[in-house]
Image: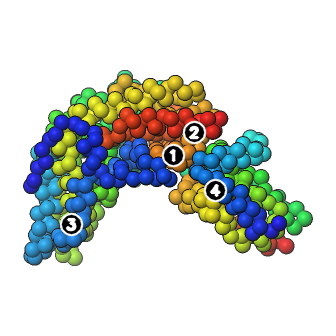
Amino acid sequence: MNLTEKQEEIIQEFEVFDDWMEKYEYIIDLGKDLPKIDDANKTEDRLIEGCQSRVWLDSHFNNGKMHFTADSDAIITKGIIGLLIRVLDGEEPKNIATADLFFISKIGLQEHLSPTRANGLLGMVKRLKLEAIKHISAA
Amino acid sequence: MSNLEQKPFNVREIREEFPALRQQVYGKNLIYFDNGATSQKPKLVLDAINLFYSKENANIHRGVHYLSQRATTDYEAARQRIQRYLGARKPEEIIFTKGTTDSINLVAFSYGSTLSAGDEILISAMEHHSNIVPWQMLCERQGCILKVAPINQRGELIMDEFDKLLSKKTKLVAITHISNTLGTVNPIKEIIQKAHAVGSKVLIDGAQSIQHMRINVKELDCDFYVFSSHKVFGPTGIGVLYGKEELLDRMPPYQGGGDMIARVTFERTTYNELPFKFEAGTPHIAGGICLGKAFEFLESIDMEAAERHERELAKYAEDMLDTFEGLQIIGEAKNKTSVVSFSLKGIHPFDIGTLLDKQGIAVRTGHHCTQPLMDFYGIPGTVRASFAFYNTKQEIDTFVEAVERSLSMLK
Ligand SMILES: Cc1ncc(COP(=O)(O)O)c(C=O)c1O
């Protein structure tokens, strides 16, 4: 599946939810299932400080593809991270750098990535793309 | 100037005056519990905003024409209404600013410029960043020293420690009347007396008290009292600095520009008299006039009954929340207003706030611009419900149910 197809799949999954609380129940479950980053690895250089919740991001470049792990102290933020990783993990750097993450607003979560939502998510996406760009220029 | 009659306190009738309270968000009736951040506006204020821009809009203090004179009269009438409400001696003691933050910065720059290296500013551990940072900046400029009076676990100022920090070196005590994060009501009358006894001036941050209780600056005898219009049912972008005339008179201007001058030549400028000396440039004219309207509205409210009602709401909410496992109320001062802050073991405040939002309930989560206070409690932030006199017990019932539901999802 390419980036667009993965996003469309998520949008479809979200169509079954009737109300906000169901949607968030699902996001919270995703957050609970996402692998944690060990406390020892929650270092300053991996930290993206939001005004409220914090995000830690770890990325690796392997065989031409990018891989990510991320964590947050807020479970909803973490659930959304889970969705972002599902879309972006295993993609080539150039696809990540130019990715239009349209699914976020389609499933109604755009507020979490708006500059006023100080949860570190917008910063995380920026950092993800920067990491990807580094590997494009290195290639 | 028209006057509304003061009526017996009736929440249902008061709610009728606030259109913003009658709306749905995410298909739920809005419950607005973020009054500590900003208040909703009564019709009286909303209509006045519309009227000003529809019929009266003109610049003030400088026009010969009808509209300008009318706007000037209304703007100055608002100043007088606020003066009377606060019990200030003269309208000249009411300076219009942009808000609490702006008022504090004005004092920090202007009064601050009269201080010397080694002079001390005394604040408390529960201050809003707006009542910390301007003093830190002053200390950097002038070599003054910032002292911080500690609090106990309940969130009350430790008066013995305060007394020890107060000395002949103290030139200003700058302290909040009510903590925006904890709801603690500080004993400002006692603080003012003690500060005056050592020759210090006192600035009261009234951002969280003006909307909850009757304030009389003459009785308090504070030297400065500051607040924001938007938290007291008026528009954003305007606020007040009350200062004693003899003090304001001796203070140099803060910003230069139009309106604050008596005469300008390239060699020398003389300044206008109070209050204009501190009001450079075209002010927020509609804001000032409509803040006057907010006070007209307040005059129609039995504030003692309103305060009782608000405290009852807080007590009611706390008693119910207290039964939740792992929930800790932050701020348990004996004397506190209608702020209920809490944290939950293992759950981030942001998650609760997000789920409450989706259930139609507006609260605030985070550090509430009081990071040193959060450090004191060793938490990243709290969930804060802050009530106004238009809130009801039914709303709290719904809120408590929503907290319960959120917890069951997050655990
Ligand atoms: C106690 C206190 N002081 C100062 C402020 C700052 O007010 P403003 O942002 O309106 O200038 C606030 C607002 O949150 C406050 O609660």
Q: Nearer the viewer, residue B376 or B34?
A: B34
N-terminal-most mark, 3 or 2: 3
Any mark on residue B221, and which? none
Q: Quadrant of residue A128?
A: bottom right
Q: How many marks?
A: 4
Q: Disc 2 marks which residue?
A: B406
SS category of the residue bearing label 1: loop
Under circle 4, the secondary element is helix
Q: Which residue is mark 4?
A: A121
Residue at image point 49% right, 26% down:
B322
Residue occupying the point 24% across, 65% down: B50
Quadrant of the image containing the C terminus of chain A: bottom right
The residue type indicated by label 1 comes to Gln
User: What residue does disc 1 label?
Assistant: B359
Give the SS element for disc 3: helix
Chain identity of mark 3: B
Could you tell me the amino acid type at mark 2?
Ser
Q: Are marks 1 and 3 on the same chain?
A: yes
- The amino acid type found where label 3 is placed reads Phe
Question: Label 2 lies in what chain?
Answer: B
